[in-house]
Image (cartoon, grey):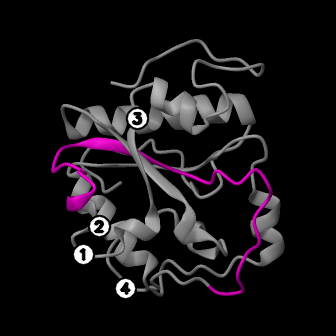
Amino acid sequence: MVRRSVVNRQGSALGHFKQQDLSAAGFMRFVALADLVDPQGPERKGIPHKPGVYVILRRNPNAPSFTEHSCGGKSPEKRNDASRQDLAAGWVDGTELIYVGEGADLRDRVAQLVRFGRGTTDGHAGGKWIWRIEDCWSLVLGYQRLESKEAAVEAEGHLLSEFKRQFDVLPFANRKDGTRRAGAGG
């Protein structure tokens, strides 16, 4: 389970949500998204067929450049037509964390995320702003295995809540707060 702590605007047990802070909180196997592109990538990188929560980080401290169009999948009901100005305005300075997600099966969920990033309509429209970052394939993914889907949903909601308390907004690519029922996709 994600370690809980009191959070205030000056900091939290998760610090500024950087890789070292998340590692100390139990996240593991930080790997570049580019290393997960191969269909066997999530398996080779040891991502388990277990429930859990995952994070995507951008370790470059400079604000990113954004592409005009997403390399990610498209569907009529979930368009990614934000302007570059909207994306720049949504960037959160002072943190590496740009997205939090969860899944009943981490390996399958991460594989969906990567396939969506390669342009399929594979059911992972969450985090769609990830695919507008020019260096999106250098982003890193880490995960924390949990005991159940319900625990993963709770952990995702907790991380998003702590982040929002510290930064006053959700992570850059989270457009929802994660407070949905346990049976919903993550």
Residue 118: mark: none
Q: Residue at x 42, y 46 (%)?
A: 142
Q: Position of residue 1 (x, y in %)?
A: 33, 24
Residue 39: mark: 1
Q: Residues within 10 Å of mark 4 (few under 14, many from 20)?
A: some
Q: Are marks 1 and 3 in contact (CB under 8 Å)?
A: no
Cα separation between marks 3 and 2: 18 Å
Q: Earlier in the sequence, mark 3 or mark 2?
A: 3
Q: Residue furthest top?
A: 6
Cα separation between marks 1 and 4: 13 Å
Instruction: Return the residue nearer the eye: 66 or 79.
Output: 66
Residue at the disc numbered 4:
120
Q: Residue at x 76, y 50 (%)?
A: 61
Of the residues shown, which amino acid type is indicated by label 2?
Answer: Ala
- Where disc 1 sits, the SS reads loop
Q: Earlier in the sequence, mark 1 or mark 3?
A: 3
> Which of labels 2 and 4 is toward the front?
2
Examine the image and state in which quarter residue 25 appears: top left
Cα separation between marks 2 and 4: 11 Å
129 left or right, relative to 126? right
Q: Are marks 3 and 2 in contact (CB under 8 Å)?
A: no
Start-end of magenta stretch = 43-69
Residue 163 to residue 138: above or below = above
Of the residues shown, which amino acid type is indicated by label 3?
Answer: Phe
- Where disc 3 sits, the SS reads loop
Cα separation between marks 3 and 4: 28 Å
Q: Earlier in the sequence, mark 2 or mark 1?
A: 1
Residue at the disc numbered 3:
27
